Image (cartoon, coloured by chain):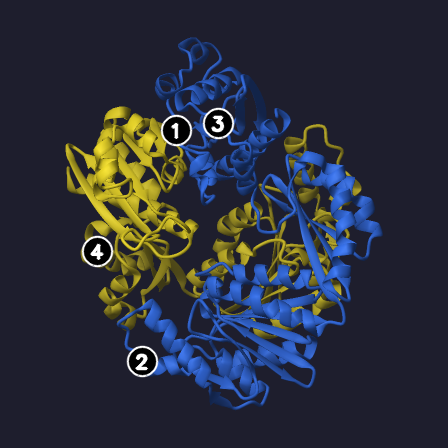
Chain colours: A blue, B yellow
Amino acid sequence: MIVELISVGTEILLGNIVNTNAAYLSEKCAVLGLSQFHQSAVGDNPKRLEDAIILALSRADILILSGGLGPTKDDLTKETAAKVMNKNLVQDIHTKERIQEYLQKVIPNHMVTENNWKQAMVPEGAIIIDNLNGTAPGIIMEDNGKRIILLPGPPNELIPMFQEDIVPYLNKLQPELIYSKMVKICGLGESYVETQIMDLIEEQTNPTVAPYAKTGEVHLRITAKARNEEDAMKLVAPVVTELKKRFQDAVFTTEERVTLEEAVVELLKERELTVTTVESCTGGLLAGKIINVAGVSDCYKEGYITYSNEAKKRLVNVSESTLAVAGAVSEECAKEMAIGGAQSANADVCIAITGIAGPDGGTQEKPVGLVYEACYYKGNVEVNKFLFKGNRDKIREQAVVKALTLLRKNIIENK
Amino acid sequence: MIVELISVGTEILLGNIVNTNAAYLSEKCAVLGLSQFHQSAVGDNPKRLEDAIILALSRADILILSGGLGPTKDDLTKETAAKVMNKNLVQDIHTKERIQEYLQKVIPNHMVTENNWKQAMVPEGAIIIDNLNGTAPGIIMEDNGKRIILLPGPPNELIPMFQEDIVPYLNKLQPELIYSKMVKICGLGESYVETQIMDLIEEQTNPTVAPYAKTGEVHLRITAKARNEEDAMKLVAPVVTELKKRFQDAVFTTEERVTLEEAVVELLKERELTVTTVESCTGGLLAGKIINVAGVSDCYKEGYITYSNEAKKRLVNVSESTLAVAGAVSEECAKEMAIGGAQSANADVCIAITGIAGPDGGTQEKPVGLVYEACYYKGNVEVNKFLFKGNRDKIREQAVVKALTLLRKNIIENK
């Protein structure tokens, strides 16, 4: 089946927002086995929106529209889609009550205004999806084998609604169910990973294997089609096993929602280890990433940002001579930062980062992008040297991912 | 004039990447006074791409295509656009030399392969734009009052090319030049700012004033049309003055490219002040933001991540009794963190953050989202209490922006 997306909102055409919904919905639809050949964005203009819907319906079986379901007069997605489908709008009592409840919960003394009830009007015969995070309900209209799905624009409303209600709906439409697993890899380059699984990518049709590159990570999605979930899982399982065999410890999770920092914190918790960070060029971003993980307080207690030489000496005991001879961006300095950090924080593990993020400060010998990362654990220190490309932000972002990878590797290898 | 965007690439339809180019180009086109009514994305498929180009050309004067200019067989944007415009492809010697030079610079011992020369083929009569950050040149085709602009997909190639070459080109097409300034505001809510300038938004047609909301900031874009830059600047200047008068110190810059952290660091440098940070729930994100600013080493030397009570005591001298009586998330604790941080780092200013980022750890009295921020400067401490909404990430992101705002306010007020 063919799906097409239309994002509705003048704010998209003015560039006020980045359309992350389109990327989210595209990935999810691809996973569901739906083909997508076009996507578009139009403003809050009824005539142009109507034309866009008619054109899209001529090419696709399923049309997903996001945005334009708000309470104001500008919001016309529902009205326009209903018109194209020849449906009248009628008041939905259940939705009216739900909106009232929702508003009372979120804004206790809020007077529900007349225009809120616009959101309780729904196309006759439509399937209504409760919105647990806002007032606009999701709506599914079916007619003559064509389907239009209307979703609220805010991602915190759209994503849970799509995941909870639209995915099962779309899955039911298809003769076969789609099931997928994600194998996430760190510490290996995208092209290396791809060459290692070329046979799987090229030979397999069910399940399929598709690589997705993120900064410093490679995600492999294994997708199977089958009559039921049990059969689909049986198809996917041996491929996951094979990928784990090929990439061994570089696989940090097979769970879609688990991030690298979550996998690392999980590992720290399992081993009952505490970790600290000593950061120069990344200036707190690594610690910030680790503390992204809820419930990290058992393993992360404190960390140091040592941007000056003085701070490197005083806080984590880097020696004057190392700074004078090898310099602050050196293997020796990274090593002393890691050892000193573990001591100062009385932590089991310490990860230290020092480098030149640019745009200034680079030399022939020590160019912008040069970063040393050290990991102290059980009396050993491993130092990695990197030469990252890109601007200041990009260099620091890569340094953080590589640091998490180095930390993870040291914990796994030195049981 | 009407512009339309087409993003080319199957990776967009599969959701592998978020289409940030579309948001960037949309904002820039809006600033240039171009109207945009549709934008779309298509995969690397010549027939569908051709149809999309023909449809877009029927509605728009200027068509901007991004992506699909690479050296592989899949990349067909140039070939397809040239076909629609009835242009032959011919080899461009200048581009061939530039590609050779570029590749030799980036990959010294790289053998230039035959498919690289595909990128030196250009439509006859087209305007060629050198790509300083990659091999694919930008291309402008003109025919019968319609224009097609082809840009490389990678943002680090597209953005500088658009800014340096396409903006002047588009500006010349119009009878009037477009000029805009950005007034960036922190510490005031979006709806408050909007009500304060309702008269300017509603009454003015040249220049116009348009608000853009970012997390914790409001950006006001003032855009004028005039025959030349001097006249346009004369139209914009009094509105900028008026906005500065209305919002006073809340205006942190009138430069489009300056971020809040850059404005704060600039202020620290001007006053020759050093700053440190003591972070609990934000765990290094504030420091990371400050150290985003290149050349910050004069004013930021070191910082502390004090996630545990023990760290709050040992590193920045929070008292046992404060932690026992008021707790780690309290006005008192934030205050002591700020005072102690300034002492430990021997810094002029210290900003401290302690709060509950969730999802767990909230109570009736101290709910998730409760954050205290304190700023120490010249013997005074100002503490702000916030109750942020959203998930863990969102709470921490808001806390960082508010901390920069508090820091800035204290420096400005306590001269």
Q: Which residue is mark 1?
A: A305
Closer to us: mark 4 or mark 2? 2
Q: Which residue is mark 3?
A: A356
Q: Can residue B352 be seen from the camera position used here?
A: yes
- Residue A168 at what x, y percent from top left? 63, 69
Tell me the quadrant of the picture where the C terminus of chain A can be found: top right
Q: Position of residue B382 (x, y in %)?
A: 18, 42
Question: Which mark is nearer the camera, 1 or 3?
Answer: 1
**Chain of the residue under label 2:** A
- Asked if the residue under mark 2 is in contact with the one under mark 1, i.e. CB atoms within 8 Å, the reply is no
Q: Find the residue positioned furthest to the right.
A: A203
Q: Amino acid at mark 2?
A: Thr
Tag nearer the camera, 1 or 4: 1
Please say if the residues under marks 1 and 3 sit with CB atoms less than 8 Å apart: no
Q: Chain under label 3?
A: A
Which chain does the numbered disc 1 sit on?
A
Left or right: where B79 falls relative to A295: right
* Kind of residue sitting beneath label 1: Ile
Q: Chain of mark 4?
A: B
Instruction: Tell me: A178 left or right of B269.
Output: right
- Give the residue type at disc 4: Phe
Q: CA distance from mark 1 to mark 3?
A: 15 Å
Question: Residue under circle 4?
Answer: B247
Please say if the residues under marks 3 and 4 sit with CB atoms less than 8 Å apart.
no
Give the labeled residue for mark 2.
Answer: A113
Quarter of image, res A73: bottom left
Q: Residue at x 37, y 36 (%)?
A: B307
**Which residue: 83% across, 45% down?**
A199
